[in-house]
């Protein structure tokens, strides 16, 4: 289980390995907001409970382009691992069918790899659509794709604990957790130190 790292602004950034989080804390680059008391880390002079949420002391500017990169891992997560044409979930695909990246406006017509122009499609739907737009193919999209929030993706591909979810919700609102059909966190037993 990783440690959720927040920016100085409390914006959730990413999950980091617990060991890296401890190092940041010992170097006074981050403060601990939540810990898992059941696990402890020892260094020469300190003993620390395992951090599960840390906050960077100084604001780190995260270049937008890193967040916006479209990878299939994140694309499929954004779309809940469902084909955006037929609606089938990855688990419903048969035989040699698989999830693919579909360009709404085909590359051959000038479509690019922007978040708003790519959707998850099963291989049969992608083949059927071919080099056509959804309108041309008569294959309407189930929802309009947009740029996902970085943290939604982290949530989707790397499970976070209810405590970590609480900090994500504090910054983005409860809706952030509902995106991608994520589980609503159970009532919290907070060990907050903030
Ligand atoms: Zn499909």
Image (cartoon, grey):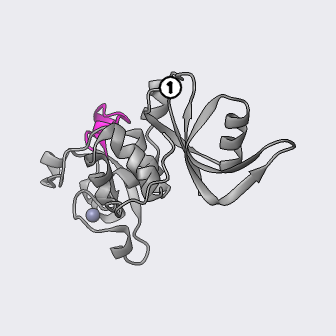
What residue lies at 14% left-to-right and 53% top-to-bottom?
140
From this viewpoint, is residue 54 visible? yes
Disc 1 secondary structure class: loop
Q: Position of residue 35 (x, y in %)?
A: 58, 51
From this viewpoint, is residue 126 visible? no
Q: Position of residue 123 (x, y in %)?
A: 36, 62
For this view, does 65 lie left or right of residue 56?
A: left
Q: Quadrant of residue 185?
A: bottom left
For this view, does 80 lie left or right of residue 29?
A: left
Residue 115 vs residue 183, the one in the foreground: 183
Q: Position of residue 87 (x, y in %)?
A: 23, 64
Quadrant for the N terminus in the image: bottom right
Q: Residue furthest right?
A: 44
Q: Is residue 107 magenta?
A: yes
Q: Quadrant of residue 91?
A: bottom left
* Position of 114 relative to 41 (above/below): above
Q: Is residue 94 magenta?
A: no
Does the beta carbon at disc 1 come under 8 Å from ligand 1?
Answer: no
* Position of 51 relative to 98 (above/below): above
Residue 192 vs residue 83, the one in the foreground: 192
What residue lies at 25% left-to-right and 39% top-to-bottom?
105
* Position of 32 relative to 127 (above/below): above
What residue lies at 14% left-to-right and 47% top-to-bottom?
136
Q: Which residue is the site of mark 1?
A: 62
Ligand 1 quadrant in view? bottom left
Residue 7 vs residue 33, the one in the foreground: 33
Boundaries of the magenta span: 104-118
Q: How many numbered dots are placed on residues in this image?
A: 1
What residue lies at 25% left-to-right and 56% top-to-bottom?
84
Q: Residues within 10 Å of mark 1 (few under 14, many from 20)?
A: few
């Amino acid at each position: 289980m990783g440690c959720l790292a927040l920016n100085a602004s409390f914006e959730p950034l990413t999950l980091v390995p617990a060991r890296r989080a401890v190092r940041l804390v010992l170097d006074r680059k981050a403060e601990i907001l939540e810990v898992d008391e059941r696990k402890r880390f020892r260094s020469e002079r300190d003993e620390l409970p395992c951090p599960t949420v840390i906050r960077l002391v100084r604001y780190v500017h995260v270049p937008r382009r890193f967040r916006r990169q479209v990878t299939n891992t994140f694309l499929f997560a954004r779309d809940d691992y469902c084909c955006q044409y037929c609606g089938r979930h990855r688990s419903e695909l048969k035989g040699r069918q698989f999830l693919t990246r579909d360009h709404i406006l085909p590359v051959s017509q000038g479509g690019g790899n922007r978040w708003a122009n790519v959707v998850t499609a099963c291989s049969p739907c992608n083949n059927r659509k071919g080099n056509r737009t959804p309108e041309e193919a008569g294959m309407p999209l189930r929802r309009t794709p947009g740029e996902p929030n970085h943290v939604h993706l982290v949530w989707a591909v790397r499970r976070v604990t209810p405590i970590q979810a609480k900090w994500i919700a504090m910054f983005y609102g409860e809706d952030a957790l509902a995106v991608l059909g994520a589980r609503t966190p159970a009532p919290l037993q907070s060990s907050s130190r903030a």
